[in-house]
Amino acid sequence: MLARVQSACVQGIEAALISVEVDVATGLPAFTTVGLPDAAVRESRERVRAAIRNCGFVFPMERITVNLAPADLRKEGASFDLPIALGILAATGVVKGDRLSRYVMLGELSLDGAIRPVRGVLPMTLACRRDGVGGLLLPGANGLEASVVEGIEVIPVRTLSEAVEFLCGEGRVEPVRTDPASLLALASADDLDFAEVRGQSLAKRALEIAAAGSHNVLMIGPPGAGKTMLARRLPPILPPLSLEEAIGVSSVWSVAGLLPPDRGLMTTRPFRAPHHTSSEAGLIGGGSVPRPGEVSLAHLGILFLDELPEFSQRALEALCQPLEDGSVVLSRAAGSTAFPARFQLVGAANPCRRGCPTLEACVCTPGERQHYLSRLSRPLLDRIDLHLDVPSVRYSELAGGVQGEPSSAIRARVLKARDLQTERFAGTKIRANARMTGREVRRFCPIPADGHALLALAMERLGLSARGHDRILKVARTIADMDGRETITVEHLSEAIQYRSLDRWLQS
Amino acid sequence: MMGRARRKPGCPSLLRNAAMKFWRSDDRRSVGKRGEDAAARFLAKRGFVIVERNVRSRLGEIDLVARDRETLVFVEVKCRREPTGDPPQTAVTPDKQRRLCRLASGYLKHHRLGEVACRFDVLAVTLDARDRVKEIRHLEHAFMAGDWG
């Protein structure tokens, strides 16, 4: 007998619906899986057989053929265990009724028939909605994640027997329902506060600008000055994720299998801090079946690269393209996959290899210093809008009981500046000043009449490229927004220019 | 069937000759024959109809072809004399299973039996030191075709 069950599989960060056809016929007993399965799918035979037996059903010792259609799509992962098992039980007449055709099924089976969670449930649920499927039968642990998508009936099952009972219309399983808005509201306020950072008022100001306009930042300073401390306090002052953005971030995390099981959704902006020994593939994404890398996991959040010059040259160069495009396209012979990567880069570096406390006390030769920082190539530095000095903290600042400004106050100002930007870019895909293209820069960032001379001088002295020029204007726009001003003034412009300090350092 | 004894490279010829002598010995053959006889009697007692014994082709040999009601059963008999290390059925390796499947599909084709229910059974026969049947284990549905990937 023939049975047909619907399932889904992940392609990049999207998903496609897969039709699982199971034919049980008399003949030499055999179990074959066709339709471009990978090793994990082919191994599902053993799990399916044991699970069916251990749940007290009869595994047919007949000629079983499983076809995964469309046949030209590569199928990977263990999420086909449950649909194959249910297909076999339907073909042998154990599962009856029309519920089988109404649900898309996914889940990995363990030998005792328990259903284990799988990766990529969120994109698969979105695919169900796109293709007009009404319901989803999935592992209990994935229920919350899928229920975020509205308009899909999500049935969580824990064991194969429970799934069979439900499909036969015997058991009752309550669908999972959640209100995504309430999940978002729950977003925990991180307890990291800028008030804890002593001194560094200039750096704090620069980070506030970065948060307000989503600009990339590079902090340069001796070890122990507080670069990492500052960077970790950046996410709490960023604007909250909208539901659409949260689903975008969660999709990537879901495909990577990193979504926290107690929360179905990434409700806060991600903060990724990969170690400087990370490989190019680890940062950008890779593998013969491409998996998202750190740049994609930091999508709509922050990618913090501590000890930036210590990263491999290839990894740093590879960052340039996603920084510009906001996505990564990984091409393989089997096809190409695009992952989103609209992240905000925060880099930290020591001014020299030895990490000397001040320039005066530095024992490195000028040549060594030059060599160390020149590992950061021009194309990369060109894409970093704000370069800032984070000097060692003085004892008076450390001991003085002066509390810094709390993050909540900074965040309020950031949100105000962001509101202006939302208004400005209404109707476009742009969310923040840093994402403006050349056309928007010319439209929204008019150079003040007395600013032309300043800008011309800066370009000449700093050897800025056209991109650097545009980036200065974008930062000036953000500073003006924080000021609540409609137009950019010379003061805004000059503050923006002084954040390009590294261009100057590398020149001398 | 005896042609299956493989030459081990690097084996001194004296040793090899001794090994071949054992491999082809009447003693071994008689253990196998005893096991098959015992298996046929055992199955007949259980209501199986023995269709054929020792079906040979150029690929090898099926020990027993029997019928259990509507199902055609291909039986592999493994016989060992006590004291044995592993139980006899462990000798039905994936390689052996593959060969049996090929033999079975050849058998079905030859007899033009397309859509008939079939299965593979293994009968593990253990003999005691005086070649009397000590134990017979019947493994129904011992394996499926395609199990090896």
Image (cartoon, helix red, strand yellow):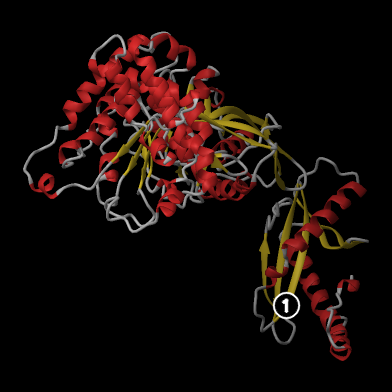
Type of amino acid under label 1: Arg
Percent x, y of residue A139: 44, 37
* Element under disc 1: strand
Q: Quadrant of residue A149?
A: top left
Is residue A79 visible in the rendered image? The answer is yes
Residue furthest to the left in view is: A401
Between A176 and A365, the one nearer to me in the picture: A365
Q: Is residue A101 above or below residue B1?
A: above
> Callout 1: 10 Å neighbours few (<14), some, many (20+)?
many
- Residue at 39%, 15% (x, y): give it: A452
Q: Chain of mark 1?
A: B
Q: Is residue A26 above or below residue B12?
A: above
Residue furthest to the bottom in view is: B14
Location of the N terminus of chain A by quadrant is: top right
Badge count = 1
- Residue at 28%, 16% (x, y): give it: A481
Percent x, y of residue A425: 39, 11
Location of the C terminus of chain A by quadrant is: top left
Between A493 and B86, the one nearer to me in the picture: A493
- Residue at 43%, 41% (x, y): give it: A506
Between A422 and A143, the one nearer to me in the picture: A422
Q: Is residue B84 left or right of residue B77?
A: left
Q: Give the labeled residue for mark 1.
A: B80
Q: Is residue A371 left or right of residue A2?
A: left
Q: Is residue B20 above or below residue A194?
A: below
Percent x, y of residue A183: 29, 27
Is residue A171 visible in the rendered image? The answer is no
Q: Quadrant of residue A244?
A: top left
Percent x, y of residue A324: 50, 28
Q: Is residue A296 above or below residue A184?
A: below
